[in-house]
Amino acid sequence: MDLVAQAKKNAGHRAADMVKDGIIVGLGTGSTVFFAMERLGERIKTEGLSILGVPTSHQTAMRAEEYGIPLTTLSLHPVLDIAIDGADQVTPSKQMIKGRGAAHLREKIVADAAKQFVVVIDSAKEVPVLDAAVPIEILPFAYGSVCKKLVELGGEPVMRNGVKKDGPVISDNGNYIFDCAFGKVDDPALLESAINSIPGVLENGVFAKMTEKTIVIVGKSA
Ligand SMILES: O=C[C@H](O)[C@H](O)[C@H](O)COP(=O)(O)O
């Protein structure tokens, strides 16, 4: 396992070890949170840990099945005790950009529903200022008018295309994903609200308003 994967595993396992018996856990999407889920699966088998997970993507639901983590829904459990998730960039004030895997719409819903948001990263994700392109989930019907408004906001929206599929990535919710560069983001909360105020935007990957309940775990590789 390379050093980055070791750091991700360390972060994921530390987050999973924070999980107490009998709680409801939001399960994010991505390579780092999958290490947390792997460890939760081990704890279920070896310690008899009893939890229910709320998955944020089809892939996470499949991984949960593989690791033996029982699942529930937000309709049955609208309040979660904890959500564990990865991120693409995180600042010292715990504002972040997420959505490399196009799962940020459900991830933000699940994080918002959780009392505590535990973010697991390796040190390459730590940045002084957010500057990555912001993933934005857009209703296909509205992508033209939304892109025009994003340009007016100072962004450069680029449709995310499939790797082993021609044409646009279609999210788990049936929508398009655009990656929109804004350069350095001086006020992430303002940008998050401005993007979401455009009709046709379902959600964007700036997570700037959950800092109080957020704990960031930066994994170590040794
Ligand atoms: O849509 C994907 C998510 O926001 C991921 O949590 C994020 O991209 C981090 O993924 P990874 O842990 O694989 O770097």
Image: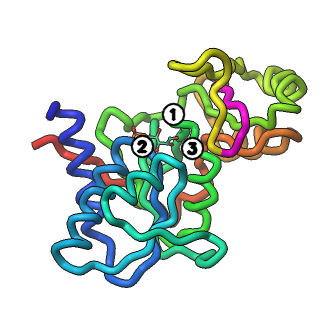
Q: Which residues are magenta?
A: 173-179
Among the 4 quarters of the image, the one containing residue 125: top left
Q: Name which residue type carries label 2.
A: Gly
Q: 191 or 38: nearer the eye?
A: 38
Q: Is residue 134 above or below residue 110?
A: above
Q: Which residue is mark 1?
A: 100
Q: Which numbered marker is on residue 103?
A: 3
Q: Residue at x 59, y 26 (%)?
A: 133
Which residue reaches farthest bottom? Answer: 22
The response on whether ligand 1 sits within 8 Å of label 3 is yes
Mark 1 in CB contact with mark 2 (< 8 angstroms): yes
Tell me the CA gap for discs 1 and 2. Answer: 8 Å
The response on whether ligand 1 sits within 8 Å of label 1 is yes
Q: Name which residue type carries label 1.
A: Arg
Task: Report x, y in % for residue 82.
Answer: 45, 70
Q: 50 or 107: nearer the eye?
A: 50
Tell me the CA gap for discs 3 and 1. Answer: 8 Å
